[in-house]
Image: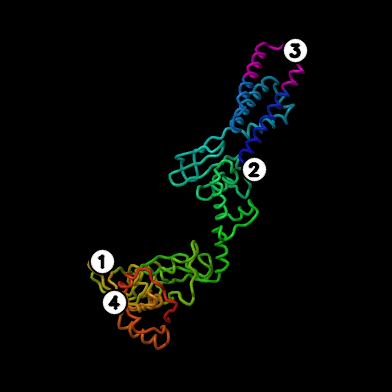
Amino acid sequence: MTYAAIEAEILDALRGALEALQMKFSEEQASTAGVDEDPADQAYAMNVTTEMRSLLNGVSGKPVSRQVLLYREALALFRDFMALEVGDAVDVEGRDLRRLVDGALGASEPLPSPVSTPWGAPQHTEFLARGVFSVITAGHGGIKVADAFNQRIPEYLRNEDGWYEEDCDWCLVALAFPDLFSDADVESAKKTLADYYPNAFEAHFGYRPTAEQSHVVAREEFDRQHRDHWQIYSARGEGRFVLGHGRVGGREGHGPERLFIVPRDEYRRREAGMNFVIDDDRHGPVPVGDVYTGDFSALLPLQSGQQVEGRVLLMGGSAVIEGTGAERFYLAPLCEQALLFVGQHVSLSVDSDGKVQWPQAWVLTMEQDGDTLFWGNRRGWTPCLEDARACASSEKAAGNLPEVGPEACRWISLDEARDFGQTTEPSFSPSA
């Protein structure tokens, strides 16, 4: 039902109540025919009749909402007059009539603009229709629908408090009362309803939106498809990699949370709005032994001029250096090298400005069809070029490297790698 249809119903109720009151008044007049009437009462009745006629003469051609206000004023005027004329007749003899009149007046009562909202004090209020207002606050906004109209909205579109925020819920009002909005707004509301409220969309239009039409439906299908897969649901990037927090089935899934290190470009290519699904053949979790689980208060800050040697561990959004002395654990900022060297032994120094100096990172690359391919993900990097060359030899002997000519492969530093810009990840990866 449109807003105009509801207003038309209210207008019909006002007209019906007014006609019923006038009929009741005519009956009372007939029953007292021949009885002398006070001239003052006659004059009062004449004034009321004239004022009512003046109000109703202005109805023709007016919008329905304006007609409602005029008929309401006329009905209220005549109700007050009848209460004086016939005493308790309306209360005692005409209870049904009183309910009819009070109901029509109640449904058409003036509906003031809201003075408060769920998002703070209103800064700007726009009148959309009687009882429907668009409200803007300092931080948010939305639409307020007065209870008389809100209760006429279908339950599957209705917010019981009558407030509809501006990002998503506005579409519920636009589809309940499309005659208050432009065609473009109604079409946009339909898309928003499909995207965020597929159940309400199905109830309203009779069919369910597809995954291409609805983010919620797409997410439901994604969750069903990947409920038994590791998923990264929170990540922070450091250079060419991201450190992600994952769990089987996602944030609300099951099992323990693990840390994963994956190439940033790969992470960016995940399906829009969805978690990153771990490829078990390429993105194994950070070994439990490489994750610091001790007390945060036991970690020592690195000081200017200090040199530290130890194994790199991860702790949420920080790196931890596991030293060999009595004071074993040092807190270091998370960076690309920390992700590259996790689980490996490194030597760090801290300059006079307090900046941690990590060793250079090296990776094996090869040229293929004009692209620079990096060997594997984080496990291909090493802080020592000598160790890197030895590692490459053993990997080749084990058959873990592709058969390419020696001129196509070379070791480059992390700084050089950054200069390549967009690169293609190889389809192979080194052994753990």
Quote the CA–CA distance across marks 1 and 2.
Answer: 69 Å
Quarter of the image that includes the N terminus: top right
Q: Position of residue 294 (x, y in %)?
A: 40, 71
Closer to viewer: mark 1 or mark 2: 2
Count neighbours of disc 3 (C-alpha within 10 A) and say few if under 14, some if 14 to 19, many if 20 or more.
few
Dot 3: element: loop
Identify the residue under disc 3. 35
- The residues colored magenta run 25-50
Disc 1: which residue: 354
> Disc 3, disc 2: CB below 8 Å?
no
Q: Earlier in the sequence, mark 1 or mark 2?
A: 2
Look at label 3 and name its amino acid: Val
Can residue 425 be found in the magenta stretch? Answer: no
Q: Which residue is mark 4?
A: 347
Q: Which residue, given by chain and number where applicable, does mark 2 sit on?
A: 1
Q: In the rendered view, would you say 217 is above or below 373?
A: above
Mark 3 vs mark 4, CA separation in Å? 116 Å
What colour-coding does the image apply? rainbow
Name which of mark 2 and mark 4 comes first in the sequence. Answer: 2
Mark closest to the chain's N terminus, 4 or 1: 4
Q: Position of residue 362 (x, y in %)?
A: 32, 77
Can residue 38 be found in the magenta stretch? yes
